[in-house]
Amino acid sequence: MQHPVTNEYQDSRRHIEETLKAIDDLKIPTLWFWPNVDAGADGTSTGIRAYREFNKLEHVHFFKNMTGDDFLKLLNKSMCLIGNSSVGIRECAYLGVPVVNIGSRQNKRDRGFNVKDVDYNKEEIKQAILKQIENARPQSSDVYGGGNAGEKIADLLSTVPLKFHKTITY
């Protein structure tokens, strides 16, 4: 799950090609999700299409979308998530799914122990993937909460007096 980085959009094709080369070399069965539509998505999508045109990726299956429930079930059974999506930082931490986080998109975000950060480099990406799938699955992390934020918010709202006083300031 690799998306373009909005302030690096001019490099998005090169970024995705490094990841494609790593996945191609490893020949591990892979489910690949198309990028979101941030600035640079054209370069990322063009890079994927061009690479597929000139290289056989028989071990890779491409998806544009799927239901949220199916996606979470798939994610939970994954050996590793590769790319730069926030799902690797947030949901995968909670699920204990190993992640290879590529590039700067998730810079300065808190991480669980499940994340290995690498640069846009085919060899770094390959080595990190192999290390992540060889290691034992990491423990679940509550770095982004334990799944009960809605209950906590509802409890708080039920005890806080909600007052509003409109003031005209002109």
Image (cartoon, rainbow, N blue to C red):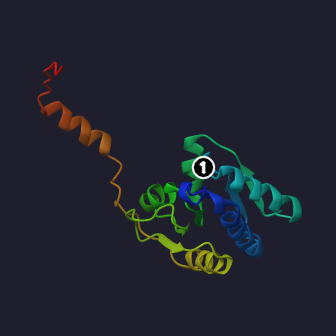
Q: Is residue 95 left or right of residue 36?
A: left
Residue 157, given in percent of the width and then of the height, sits at 20, 33
**Which residue corresponds to the image point at 35% horizontal and 56% vertical from the top-left?**
144
Screen quadrant of the N terminus: bottom right
Query: Where is mark 1, residue-wise?
Result: 39
Q: Nearer the viewer, residue 55 or 90?
A: 55
Residue 54 pos. (x, y %): 88, 63
Q: Is residue 154 left or right of residue 162?
A: right
Label 1: element kind: loop
- Residue 130: where, in percent of width, then height? 62, 78
Q: Nearer the viewer, residue 86 or 114?
A: 86
Q: Position of residue 26 (x, y in %)?
A: 73, 75
Q: Is residue 27 above or below residue 86?
A: below
| Residue, far front | 170
Q: Quadrant of the C terminus?
A: top left
> Residue 7 is drawn in which quadrant?
bottom right
When the figure is inspected, residue 61 is found, relative to residue 100, above or below; the finding is above
Q: Residues within 10 Å of mark 1 (few under 14, many from 20)?
A: some
Which residue does the image show at 55% across and 43% down from the upper left? 69
Image-quadrant location for residue 121: bottom right
What residue do we see at 64% from left, 42% from top? Answer: 66
Examine the rendered structure and indicate whether residue 154 appears above or below residue 13: above
In the foreground, 138 or 37: 37
Q: Amino acid at mark 1?
A: Ala
Q: Is residue 123 above or below residue 45?
A: below
